[in-house]
Structure formats: structure tokens, C-alpha cells
Image: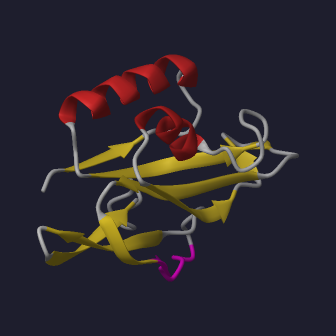
């Protein structure tokens, strides 16, 4: 089984150009499971409910595209946002999914963000696997 994990860094750094490169990379690697972090559903950049994992999967055509919002963003780069903006985790796969859930972690008092783990149970060659998609803090004291 081949697993690819990628932080897609929201809509920063020219998403349209990066999206094409991400799609090409995923196609070239041919993973069984793609785990994505910093997947945004952002009404400033996409149609409602057409978040970034869905945009990728519109081309990639995986059987399953499961997005889970982790937090609603009230500001981005210290600038308030005035439309719905959600940061989340996503999984793309053609494997059968037996279960998936979002495990919310206790928020550290000095962490600006909420943290969660996306748990996915898949079947590959009649064996069940539990996969965890994690987006930890880049601060060592919070990671």
C-alpha cells in the first residue's frame, strides 16, 4: 500500500499553479491513499462546499474524497475574514473505507489553532488498516 501525505498550504502561493503541480505529482506517484492537510473551504476562493480536496479530486477521480473541517478561521495572517473560511483535513482513496472520524484534540491554552486527527479505516488486500491524518503545530512545544 502506498500512502502520500501532503500539506497543501491553503490558497497561499498561487493555488491555480500549485494545484496543477499537485495533481501531476499525485498522478505520477499513484498512491492508494492521499492524506491532505491545510485543506481550505474558503468562499473567497472557491464556490461553497467546493474545497481544495474536491477541486483536486474533480481531476484525480478517486472513489472517496472525505473532507473534515477542523476549525473556522476568523482571521488569516492577522487579517479578519468576513466570509466562511474553514481549515481542515482530507483523504482521497479508491480503497474501501470501513470507518472515518474526526478526533478532536484538547486545545493548548496558548495555541491559536484547534488540532485534530482524521482517522480512516480502510481495506487493502482483505486486511484492515487504520490510518491517521495529522496536522500538528510547527511549534515544538505544541506538536
Q: Which residue is drawn at 41% across and 57% down?
A: 91
Colour scheme of the picture: secondary structure
**Apparent side of residue 118 relative to residue 34 in the rendered image (left or right):** right
Instruction: Point out residue 6 in the picture as x, y percentages from the top left corner.
Output: 34, 44
Instruction: Point out residue 65 in the picture as x, y percentages from the top left corner.
Output: 48, 54
Compared to 26, does 101 lie above or below? below
Residue at the top extreme? 17
Q: In which quarter of the image is residue 88?
A: bottom right
Q: Give the range drawn in magenta.
A: 101-109
Q: Which residue is drawn at 39% across and 29% down?
A: 23
**Apparent side of residue 8 relative to residue 68 in the rendered image (left or right):** left
**Between 95 and 33, which is closer to the camera in this rendering?**
95
**Between 80 and 59, which is closer to the camera in this rendering?**
59
Q: In which quarter of the image is the C terminus?
A: bottom left
Residue 49: within the magenta? no
Residue at the right extreme? 82
Count of marks placed on residues: 0
Q: Which residue is drawn at 31% across and 69% down?
A: 132
**Apparent side of residue 82 relative to residue 16 in the rendered image (left or right):** right
Q: In which quarter of the image is residue 113?
A: bottom right
Instruction: Point out residue 102 in the picture as x, y percentages from the top left corner.
Output: 49, 76
Q: Residue at x 50, y 48 (%)?
A: 38
Instruction: Point out residue 77 in the picture as x, y percentages from the top left corner.
Output: 66, 40
Q: Quadrant of the N terminus?
A: bottom left
Amino acid at each position: 500500500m502506498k500512502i502520500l501525505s501532503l500539506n497543501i498550504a491553503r490558497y497561499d502561493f498561487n493555488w491555480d499553479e500549485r494545484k496543477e503541480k499537485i495533481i501531476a505529482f499525485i498522478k505520477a506517484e499513484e498512491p492508494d491513499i492521499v492524506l491532505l492537510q491545510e485543506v481550505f473551504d474558503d468562499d473567497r476562493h472557491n464556490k461553497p462546499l467546493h474545497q481544495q480536496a474536491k477541486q483536486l479530486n474533480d481531476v484525480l477521480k478517486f472513489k472517496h474524497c472525505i473532507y473534515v473541517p477542523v476549525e473556522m478561521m476568523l482571521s488569516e495572517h492577522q487579517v479578519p475574514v468576513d466570509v466562511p473560511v474553514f481549515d481542515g483535513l482530507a483523504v482521497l482513496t479508491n480503497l474501501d473505507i470501513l470507518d472515518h472520524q474526526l478526533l478532536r484534540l484538547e486545545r493548548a491554552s496558548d495555541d491559536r489553532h484547534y488540532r485534530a486527527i482524521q482517522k480512516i479505516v480502510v481495506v487493502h488486500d482483505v486486511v484492515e488498516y487504520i490510518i491517521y491524518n495529522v496536522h500538528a503545530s510547527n511549534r515544538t512545544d505544541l506538536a
